[in-house]
Amino acid sequence: MSGYVVLVTGAGSGFGRLTAEALTRRGHTVFAGLRDVTGRNAQAAADLSASMRVVELDVTEQASADRAVSEIMSAAGRIDVVVNNAGMIFPGPLEAFTAEEAQRQFDVNVLGALRVNRAALPHLRARGQGLLLQIGSIAGLVTTPFTGLYAASKAALESLTEAWRHELAPFGIESVIVDAASYPTSIGLNAALPADTERLSVYGEAFGGFTTAVVQRSTEIGGDPREVADAVVKLIESDDRPLRTVVGPAGQREPALALSRASAETAEQAGAAMGVAAFMTR
């Protein structure tokens, strides 16, 4: 196998597809994880299979994650990198969401990464090396109105990534996260609005104005989503992998970078104050 053996989840579109394609061009052996490869993602699976291996993977099911990793091990004999990209967004006022909808948001964005990493980690640990790379969001650092569920899920992913980094370092395994700004990808097309339309309507004017402002600002700033894929490739191929990498147009990137630096400094100070600094890896 050439280069690294990489599993990319949610590889059918957006950052996942761009990342899988970029890694393939760089000579790495890529396994593109997609759900429903004979149904809604049949065309994406057909397109990707021309240059990489497609594995069926539904991150909301542990058995599916286990099967996908087993398939990779059978085909490649090892797995070096997991890119946890699969995700979705539930925009809207928190009051309008049911607990079941919130559970779905976390099931994909947070528990999905937990399941896939759980499936891969015994194999990484056996080799004494590996990389877990999560695709996060600036929303995990800054919470704005009407993004509460999504931001909370990405903030949780930040915490998991940092915990993995500390806990897995003794085994030679690294954990990092790429905090991406808003880019024109398909995630917005797949957004799930609250089912409770009555409560949603209470916030109608404010929510509509917020959505319009976000779209307008995104159009003004622009940005190429391939920047995120390029950042992922760079991290995978680098010997120096920081915990957080912020990617986005300057207007969004600089404030998020400042928050990221402040968070790292505060975490280091808090760890020292709690007497656990020796167990924390930077």
Image: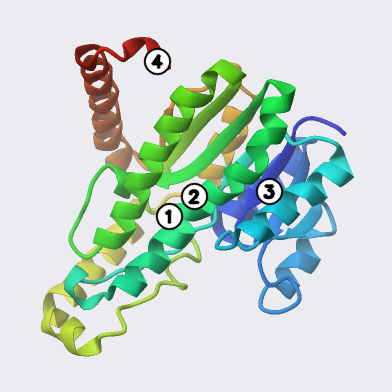
Identify the residue position indicated by label 4 in the image: 279
Separation of marks 1 and 4 at Cα, in angstroms: 36 Å
Separation of marks 2 and 3 at Cα, in angstroms: 16 Å
Quick check: can you spot residue 245? Answer: no
Identify the residue position indicated by label 3 in the image: 20
Towards the viewer: 231 or 191: 191
Identify the residue position indicated by label 1 in the image: 183
Residues marked 1 and 2 touching at CB (< 8 Å): yes
Identify the residue position indicated by label 2 in the image: 224
Q: Residues within 10 Å of mark 4 (few under 14, many from 20)?
A: few
Residue under the point 71% across and 79% down:
39
Amino acid type, callout 2: Asp
Q: Is residue 209 above or below residue 245?
A: below
Query: What is the x, y in percent for residue 266?
Result: 22, 22
Query: What is the x, y in percent for residue 141?
Result: 27, 42
Q: Earlier in the sequence, mark 1 or mark 3?
A: 3
